[in-house]
Image: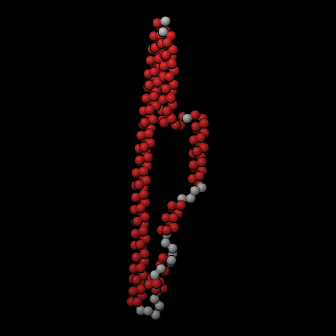
């Protein structure tokens, strides 16, 4: 009967150890803010480092987009020699019809430039929306993976707790039976 008491005590110890490990796993997954003093200090230092580093980094993507999109005053209009002739303007000795024609040509050239800029903006907006959709899908996939990992850890931790408590109860029963018989 001493064997029942000893095996019951061992089962109780093993059961309590398994339950403690299960609680620890579950707590790590669902309550990371309660990770103790050392964990909180580590998390605070990591947060401060991330925020401080972000203050000194330049957003290169935005700068590159703006550099490529903004027109240079006068430079865009002087590319083609035909446009240069239009921008020079008529002599003051020309007739009113020639000046009107010149103004219509200037309006048509400027209208073409406006259409080019609008087309570039539309293309960039479409690319940006496509990138946002792709990023959104990637974030959704990552969230799903994280949720699955948390579910698995929860099941693993809770299962370990359940088995541990079962072993502890069986050990308690065996110890009680062994003590009663002796």
- Side of 172 relative to 51 (left or right): left
> Is residue 86 in view?
no
Front residue (pair 98, 151)? 151
Q: Where is residue 119, by image quadrant?
A: bottom left
Residue in the image at 44% along x and 92% along y = 94
> Is residue 110 in view?
yes
Q: How is the image coloured?
A: secondary structure
Front residue (pair 157, 70)? 157
Q: Residue 4 location, x and y as percent? A: 48, 12
Placement of 121 over or under 73, stated as above or below: above
Q: Residue 154 location, x and y as percent? A: 44, 34
Placement of 117 over or under 93, stated as above or below: above
Residue in the image at 53% along x and 63% along y = 63
Number of marks in the rendered image: 0
Q: Residue 101 location, x and y as percent? A: 39, 86
Front residue (pair 57, 84)? 57
Front residue (pair 156, 109)? 156
Q: Residue 16 location, x and y as percent? A: 50, 23
- Side of 56 relative to 88 (left or right): right
Q: Which residue lies furthest to the bottom in this view?
A: 93
Residue in the image at 51% along x and 21% along y = 13
Q: Where is residue 126, by image quadrant?
A: bottom left
Residue in the image at 43% along x and 64% along y = 124
Q: Residue furthest front?
A: 3
């Amino acid at each position: 009967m001493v064997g029942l008491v000893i095996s019951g005590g061992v089962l109780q110890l093993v059961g309590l150890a398994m339950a403690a490990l299960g609680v620890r796993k579950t707590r790590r997954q669902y309550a990371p803010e309660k990770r103790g003093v050392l964990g909180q200090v580590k998390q605070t230092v990591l947060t401060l480092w991330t925020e401080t580093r972000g203050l000194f980094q330049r957003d290169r993507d935005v700068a590159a987009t703006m550099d490529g999109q903004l027109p240079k005053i006068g430079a865009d209009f002087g590319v083609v020699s035909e446009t240069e002739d239009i921008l020079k303007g008529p002599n003051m000795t020309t007739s009113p019809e020639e000046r009107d024609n010149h103004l219509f040509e200037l309006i048509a050239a400027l209208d073409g430039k406006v259409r080019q800029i609008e087309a570039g903006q539309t293309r960039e907006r479409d690319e940006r929306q496509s990138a946002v959709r792709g990023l959104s899908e990637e974030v959704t996939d990552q969230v799903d993976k994280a949720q699955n990992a948390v579910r698995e850890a929860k099941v693993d931790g809770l299962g370990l707790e359940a088995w541990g408590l079962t072993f502890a109860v069986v050990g308690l029963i065996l110890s009680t039976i062994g003590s009663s018989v002796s």
